[in-house]
Amino acid sequence: MKRNILHACATLGVSLLLVAPGVSAAKTQDNYTQRPEAQALIAELVEQGFSAAELEGVLDQAKQQKSILKAMSRPAEKRLTWGEYRKLFLTKKRISQGLKFWKENQQVLNKAEQEFGVPAEIIVAIIGIETSYGRITGNYRVVDALATLGFDYPRRAKFFREQLKEYFLLTRAEGVDPLTLKGSYAGAMGLGQFIPSSFNSYAIDFDGDNKKDIWNNPHDAIGSVANYFAKHGWKTGETVRVKAIAPATAEQNWFNDGLELKLSMAEWRARDFSSAAELDDAETVSLMRLEKDGEFQDWFGLHNFYVITRYNHSRLYASAVYELSAALNAKR
């Protein structure tokens, strides 16, 4: 197992906001610290007990990553069909690795399922899709990713500056050097790829060692994913999605109209839709049409499907999680 970052920092007494020796405090035009938005962020954090000098010391060392800006412009969920997206995740290798991960962590998965009501296969599928069960957790320094997006990605800069703020809160609470943690190009971290605000809201210490180590400790990662789903309203034992049977008169704009559960089954039946499994008239659902190998598949997304989209706001992502979980469960 990789070195436990949180334990190492606590044991060695690493400073919360460690500035590497030899780095000048002098600021240049290229430093993020010079940005008005950065100064505003620093001022907010100072009000919460941070040292301005230490915060500036970290931001002085944050580096813009152009590859991150490029990656943000081409997310797979927006450029691939369902069939293309599915092939990335529904592979024999990912299924076999998932079964191995499940076997190695069966006891803690059982504990998570009992405490939170979230099926083990859903938890395993999330971790499998996010990081190939911890094999690919990201090589960007989190502070670089969040600074790049918070100060150089106007479309969502406000969101990522808030994540940078949450990141400083996280590292203070966990006693971690903010210059050391690594994650994805969007600043997501650990086996389950939590962004800082998700970590602060949903990460838990699931093995009782007084640390929330989602980077190296599968127990904490599994418990945190289960807690995330439970807090977002996962309904134990309920269906995720059901095959929809559309009439020839169905209008195109009825499909893929957001992820929210807008219409009840009674309203869809009034439009001459039916479902492959019995659903109550009062149940609200979303309607999606997915393309695979040149053909279309129509589905009703139920409440638990919507909960999966709270982890990643994409019907392709939620469909991949569900199908991988089903494949894993079938092999078990």
Image (cartoon, rainbow, N blue to C red):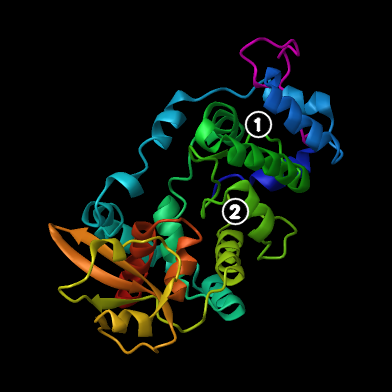
Residue 305: within the magenta?
Answer: no
Residue 23: within the magenta?
Answer: yes
Q: Quadrant of residue 141?
A: top right
Mark 2 — residue? Answer: 214
Q: Label 1 near label 2: C-beta < 8 Å?
A: no
> Which residue is located at x 46 percent, y 73 percent?
304
Image coords of residue 136 (percent x, y)? 43, 45
- On screen, 150 above or below 282? above
Which residues are the magenta region? 14-32
Magenta-highlighted stretch: main secondary structure?
loop
Mark 1 — residue? Answer: 179
Image coords of residue 146 (percent x, y)? 58, 35
Name the residue nearer the viewer: 42 or 213: 42
Question: Does the rendering let one see residue 123?
Answer: no
Image coords of residue 292 (percent x, y)? 18, 59
Q: Answer with left or right where residue 287 lies relative to residue 296.
A: right
Q: Answer with left or right where residue 291 lies relative to residue 149.
A: left
Q: Answer with left or right where residue 288 lies relative to residue 60.
A: left
Kindly identify the amino acid type of the residue bearing the numbered disc 2: Ile
Image coords of residue 113 (percent x, y)? 54, 77
> Which residue is located at x 51 percent, y 82 percent?
236
Circle 2: element type: loop
> Which residue is located at x 55 percent, y 46 percent?
189
